[in-house]
């Protein structure tokens, strides 16, 4: 696995989390219980702190970064889709950021909210709990997120992580 300390910062990864061998974790990063970090994902806590809660998936080729002034925090039971970019934002418990989305500085995505595929949520925007953010730049549609879809996605990735943790094996270079 590509897990790196940076200066005094050593990543803290819960023993029940699954980090794919081709993911990269650097520096000031915490990953919670039963969370999953998939191939090509990069969590680079070089300038500030990154916190990933419990039972959260960070899917293939997503990039999570931060700055010295603002951490990046992803809560419990979140689904972060493929090729997502999170930068200095807060994703509250039970939220989803769909594939290809970009969520920028000081954004807060509320509990049970969904950032739609390929949406761009600009600096300082708030996505209220249960809302759907669509488009580039993102427009907010109150009450349009489907919480059951997020819950199902989170549960599926916890099970996948458990399976991969015990069944994944490399057979060639």
Image (tube, rainbow, N blue to C red):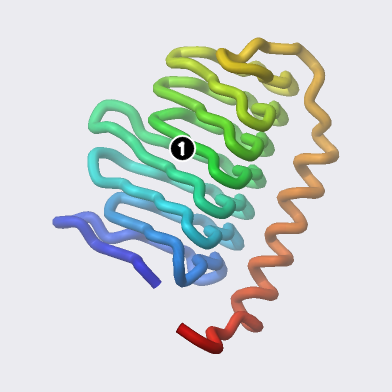
Q: Residue at x 26, y 27 (%)?
A: 69
Query: Which image quadrant: the N terminus?
Result: bottom left
Residue 124 falls left or right of residue 133: left
Residue 129 in the image: above or below residue 2: above
In-image side of 47 versus 172 (left or right): left
Quarter of the picture holding the C terminus: bottom left
| Residue 161, image x, y percentages | 64, 67
Left or right of residue 122, residue 45 in this image: left
Q: Is residue 9 above or below residue 146?
A: below
Specify the quadrant of the image occupied by residue 5: bottom left
Classify mark 1: residues with Cα within 10 Å, few (<14), some (14-19) or many (20+).
many
- Of 1 and 70, nearer the camera is 1
- Relative to the observer, which residue lies in front, 5 or 32? 5
Choose top left, top right, bottom left or bottom right for residue 65: top left
State the residue position of label 1: 73
The front one of 100 and 58 is: 100
Q: Position of residue 82 (x, y in %)?
A: 60, 46
Give the image location of residue 78, x and y in percent: 64, 43
Q: How many marks?
A: 1
Which residue is at the far front? 173
In the image, is residue 155 above or below residue 98? below
């Amino acid at each position: 696995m590509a897990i790196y300390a940076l200066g005094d910062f050593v990543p803290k990864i819960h023993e029940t989390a699954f980090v794919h061998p081709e993911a990269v974790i650097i520096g000031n990063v915490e990953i919670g219980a039963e969370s999953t970090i998939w191939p090509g994902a990069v969590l680079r806590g070089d300038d500030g702190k990154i916190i990933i809660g419990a039972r959260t998936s960070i899917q293939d080729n997503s990039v999570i970064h931060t700055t010295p002034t603002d951490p990046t925090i992803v809560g419990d039971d979140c689904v972060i889709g493929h090729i997502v970019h999170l930068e200095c934002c807060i994703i509250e418990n039970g939220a989803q950021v769909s594939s290809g989305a970009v969520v920028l500085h000081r954004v807060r995505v509320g509990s049970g909210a969904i950032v739609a595929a390929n949406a761009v949520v600009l600096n300082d925007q708030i996505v209220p709990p249960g809302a759907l953010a669509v488009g580039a730049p993102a427009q907010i549609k109150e009450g349009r997120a489907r919480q059951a879809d997020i819950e199902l996605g989170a549960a599926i990735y916890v099970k996948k992580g458990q399976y991969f943790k015990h069944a994944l094996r490399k057979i060639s270079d």
